[in-house]
Amino acid sequence: MKINILAAMSLAFLAGCAGQGALHQNSNQEQQGLIFSVSDASYTLTPECTRSAEVDHDEDGRPMVVVSMKRSPECSEKAFETVFSKVGQHMTIEYGDQVLVHDSPIITPMNPASPFWTGVEDDALARDISEHLD
C-alpha cells in the first residue's frame, strides 16, 4: 500500500513537471525572434514588432534577411534605447540557437525605422526567419 501511494505521488509530481515544461516551451516559442544583444542588454524582435521580413541575396548570391520594424514605443523606440544606440559596444544577433552576427562593433546608432539586412548561412534558415517574423 505504501509503495502504491509513493508511486502515485511520484507520477503526480512528474506530470506537474511535464506540464510546466510544456508551458515554458510555448512561452519561449512565442518569444522567439531575432535577438540583438550587447554586453548589458538585449532586445528580441518578434512578429508583433516586425512590419516586414523577406529573403534577398547579396551580389555573391549569399542569403540575407531584410527586416523592417514597426514604429512604436514598444518596438522601434525600445530597440533603439536598449541596443541600437549603444555606440562602441559589440552586438550579437541570434535566431534560436543560430548566431547570425557575432560581436560586431556598433560604429553609429542603428536606425530602427530603416530596413536592416543580416546575412544567414543558408536559404532554408533565411526563409525560416522571414516566415516567422513576417
Image (cartoon, grey):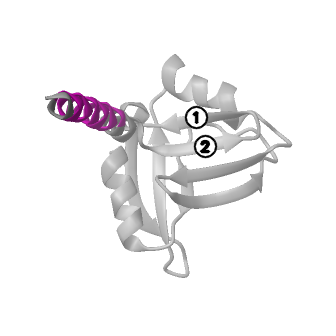
Near mark 2 (Cα within 10 A), the count class, few <14, some 14-19 or many ≥20, is many
Q: Main secondary structure of the magenta part?
A: helix
> Disc 1 versus disc 2: distance between alpha carbons?
5 Å
Q: Which quadrant: the N terminus?
A: top left
**1 or 2: tag closer to the N-terminus:** 2
How far from the left and from the top, in percent, is residue 93?
60, 51
Q: Disc 1 on helix, strand or loop? A: strand
- Amino acid beneath label 1: Tyr
| The image quarter in which residue 6 lies | top left
Q: Which quadrant: the C terminus?
A: top left
**Residue with the most extreme bottom position:** 60
Q: Identify the residue position indicated by label 1 in the image.
A: 43
- Amino acid beneath label 2: Phe
For residue 91, side relative to residue 67 (left or right)? right
Could you tell me if the residues under marks 1 and 2 are in contact, i.e. CB atoms within 8 Å? Answer: yes
Over which residues does the magenta segment extend?
Answer: 5-24
One can see residue 113 in this view: no
| The image quarter in which residue 14 lies | top left
For residue 119, side relative to residue 108 (left or right)? left
Give the residue displayed 55% in from the left and 28% down from the top. 76
Q: Nearer the viewer, residue 118 or 114?
A: 118
For residue 31, side relative to residue 40 (left or right)? left
Q: Disc 2 on helix, strand or loop? A: strand
Give the residue displayed 53% in from the left and 17% down from the top. 73
| The image quarter in which residue 85 lies | top right
Near mark 1 (Cα within 10 A), the count class, few <14, some 14-19 or many ≥20, is many
Judge whether 78 appears above or below 126 on screen: above
One can see residue 64 in this view: yes
Q: Identify the residue position indicated by label 2 in the image.
A: 36
How far from the left and from the top, in percent, is residue 96?
46, 52
